[in-house]
Image: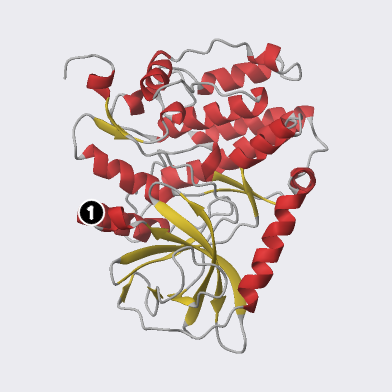
């Protein structure tokens, strides 16, 4: 197989753990393909335990090949810089879409919200039940960070979940430090904020939060402080009637959502597939004419200006020179690696930063990864 190079263009997002660059893959015969490159920030790069765990997760996530999961191709290390190379999704994350709806004083339609949740549930079930190709043993992949920021929607109406590797590695790291939990507390399950062992039902609860918010156009468990959010999740406090917040939601649909939000995981949907089945049954029985094209067209309308800006960024990235500046030292995939050469720290187009390897994700992954640490017993005033 011929080796490709990656050219880093504009940095499009930065969070507490990583920064994402628009980029392009460059191959033989003038081949070019727009990609995205997610680079781990230096303070995580110095944590050897995290990097080893993240490397292991990257190996696993490369095997998650599903239409509703952002593909991961490579994780590489060069001179202390680490980067994840993934599929590029031309669109927006669900958080950005909901924010745009709020600004425009509109909302997602019920079938759109159901379709997004059903596609996400399908992806989660695939990951929950994924087995090793050789041993046939379950890989036990739980996302742990299902949230609007990690659900991507393309302008064609495709729905994909991202960040499996980062979420799993991050949580595995904290699990080795008793009493400590990191993440977006308002999207965690009760068992997750209590630092209990997790299975796929935790992701089901998180997805039910996302669906509730998509229908209500209102945050569910967000508190003024992290401790308040944790308390709301632990107590499963749902002070609003979904039917009152959205007149298009009937008692049957509310029942599906509330089952996903059961505090007792034995009362929840036991699999993401069961959740998807009920969501699709309701969708097809009430909105038989709905297609994913409707979702894509809605995205194009409400995010028209953002889409235009992105197209300009893509054109600039494709116009960059494609001469590699160095050779990789190590990589997960054979014949791949990442080279971070010269240019400014923000990696604007023309910085000539090059990566060699495969291809990466998300045109608009809003990096609001608020990974604050908190000791749960201490925060809640409980004895350890």
Name the secondary structure under disc 1: loop
Residue 211 in the image: above or below residue 263: below
Q: Residues within 10 Å of mark 1 (few under 14, many from 20)?
A: few
**237 and 278: which is toward the camera:** 237
* Residue drawn at point x = 79 percent, y = 38 percent: 290
Q: Residue at x 56, y 88 (%)?
A: 28
Q: Please say whether residue 27 is visible from this viewpoint.
A: yes
Callout count: 1
Q: Is residue 287 left or right of residue 125?
A: right
Along the viewing direction, whichever of 265 and 244 lies nearer the viewer: 244
Depth check, front residue: 319 or 250: 319
Q: Residue furthest right?
A: 289
Q: Is residue 219 left or right of residue 167?
A: right
Give me the residue at 50% from left, 75% from top: 6
Name the residue at the bottom extreme: 29
Of all residues, the one furthest to the front in this rendering is 344
Query: Where residue 61 appears, x then y in whole percent?
Result: 41, 56
Q: Quadrant of the C terminus?
A: top left
Against 292, residue 194 (above or below) is above
Q: Pick whichever, 310 or 124, lies toward us.
A: 310
Dot 1 corresponds to which residue? 47
Q: Position of residue 183 (x, y in %)?
A: 38, 36
Tell me if I can see residue 251 in this picture. Answer: no
């Amino acid at each position: 197989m011929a080796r490709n190079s990656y050219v880093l263009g504009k940095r499009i997002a930065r969070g507490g753990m990583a920064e994402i660059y628009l980029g392009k893959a460059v191959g033989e015969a003038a081949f070019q393909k727009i990609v995205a490159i997610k680079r781990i920030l230096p303070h995580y790069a110095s944590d050897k335990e995290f990097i080893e765990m993240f490397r292991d997760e990257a190996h696993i996530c490369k095997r998650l090949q599903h239409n509703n999961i952002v593909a991961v191709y490579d994780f590489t290390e060069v001179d202390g810089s680490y980067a994840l190379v993934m599929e590029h999704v031309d669109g927006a994350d669900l958080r950005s879409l909901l924010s745009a709806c709020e600004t425009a004083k509109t909302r997602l339609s019920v079938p759109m919200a159901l379709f997004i949740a059903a596609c996400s549930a399908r992806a989660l079930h695939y990951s929950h039940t994924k087995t090793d190709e050789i041993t046939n043993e379950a890989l036990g992949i739980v996302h742990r960070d299902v949230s609007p920021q990690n659900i991507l929607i393309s302008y064609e109406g495709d729905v994909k979940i991202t960040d499996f590797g980062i979420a799993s590695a991050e949580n595995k790291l904290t699990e080795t430090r008793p009493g400590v939990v990191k993440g977006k507390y308002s999207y965690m399950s009760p068992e997750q904020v209590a630092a209990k062992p997790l299975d796929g039902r935790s992701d089901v609860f998180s997805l039910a939060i996302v669906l509730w918010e998509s229908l209500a156009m209102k945050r569910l468990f967000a508190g003024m402080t992290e401790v308040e959010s944790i308390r709301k999740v632990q107590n499963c406090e749902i002070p609003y009637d979904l039917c009152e917040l959205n007149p298009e939601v009937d008692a049957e649909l509310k029942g599906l959502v509330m089952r996903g939000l059961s505090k007792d995981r034995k009362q929840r949907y036991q699999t993401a597939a069961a959740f998807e089945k009920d969501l699709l049954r309701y969708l097809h029985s009430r909105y038989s004419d709905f297609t994913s094209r409707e979702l894509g067209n809605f995205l194009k309308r409400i995010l028209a200006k953002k889409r235009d800006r992105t197209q300009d960024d893509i054109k600039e990235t494709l116009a960059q020179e494609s001469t590699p500046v160095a050779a990789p030292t190590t990589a997960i995939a054979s014949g791949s690696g990442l080279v971070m050469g010269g240019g400014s720290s923000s990696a604007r187009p023309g910085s000539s930063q090059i990566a060699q390897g495969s291809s990466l994700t998300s045109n608009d992954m809003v990096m609001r990864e608020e990974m604050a640490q908190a000791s749960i017993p201490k925060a809640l005033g409980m004895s350890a």
